[in-house]
Image (spheres, rainbow, N blue to C red):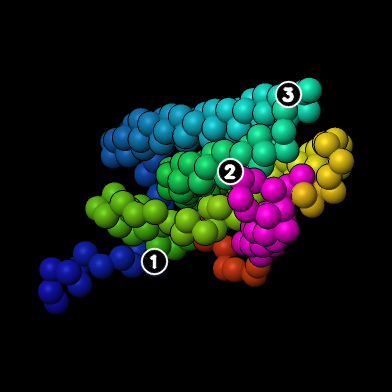
Amino acid sequence: MSTDDAHRFDPEAPEEREIGREMVDQSTGLGSVMAHFYRGEMDRVSTWRQRLDETTTWAVTVIAALLAYGFSTSGTPTIILAGIVVTTIFLAIEARRYQDYDVFRARVRILQENLFANALDPSEGVEQRDWRRQLSEDFRDPTLRIPFSEAIARRLRRIYLWLLFLLLVAWLFRLTTVAQGKTWIDNATIGVVPGSIILGLVAMFYLGLVWITFRPRSRRAREDFGRE
């Protein structure tokens, strides 16, 4: 038997079945090591969760400021359109942060499901037979668990799709309230670009958002409480 075969994961090995008891056994030291590791991972989860909230807060603040200016006497529909662009940039930033957040959240859930739950009630066994191998591979070669497109879709479903549709409604409403004796399509004109083209581009952009948000895809992100 080779060295690799000797150290290959065996789901039926006694040490795997007794992982809960190992954790509370003072002689192994596993409980102390995993407690410090779990505390560190929870700190990372909290840090990245805070970064997600900060991005959302900035997006809401900018949207509120742009809407206030856009509906003022000196405001134009173009400033609200600029708000759509800025919010999309915030969406991209938050999706990238969500990818990092999901890495550490997944590690914490693996420990909770397979180590701590088993330590509290060893009779139920572990949720994932190969959870040790998963963590080991993640430590040796850390990688993002979900693609950028899925992160974008999850943040859109959570909040950004509704923020962007709010801006769309505000922009369309502002187009109909601008004076100067023009039609609302003419009011959408930006520079030398006709309003009909601007409306077409905006419609394509929002159709793309809806497709990204709701198109069927295999779920790769970790799930907490059945929510995003």
The quadrant holding residue 21 is top left
Locate residue 15, reporting x and y percent: 34, 55
Q: CA distance from mark 2 to mark 1?
A: 51 Å
Figure check: 86 above or below 17? above
Residue occupied by mark 3: 74
Label 3: few (<14), some (14–19) or many (≥20) C-alpha neighbours in 10 Å: few
Label 3 vs 2, first from the N-terminus: 3
Label 1: few (<14), some (14–19) or many (≥20) C-alpha neighbours in 10 Å: some
Dominant SS in magenta: helix
The quadrant holding residue 9 is bottom left
Which is more foreground, mark 2 or mark 1?
2
Q: Mark 2 is on which residue type? A: Val
Label 2 vs 1, first from the N-terminus: 1
Q: Residue at x 63, y 37 (%)?
A: 83
Q: Residue at x 25, y 67 (%)?
A: 8
Camera-side residue: 226 or 96?
A: 96
Q: Residue furthest bottom?
A: 1
Locate residue 227, reporting x and y percent: 68, 48
The answer to whether residue 119 is magenta is no
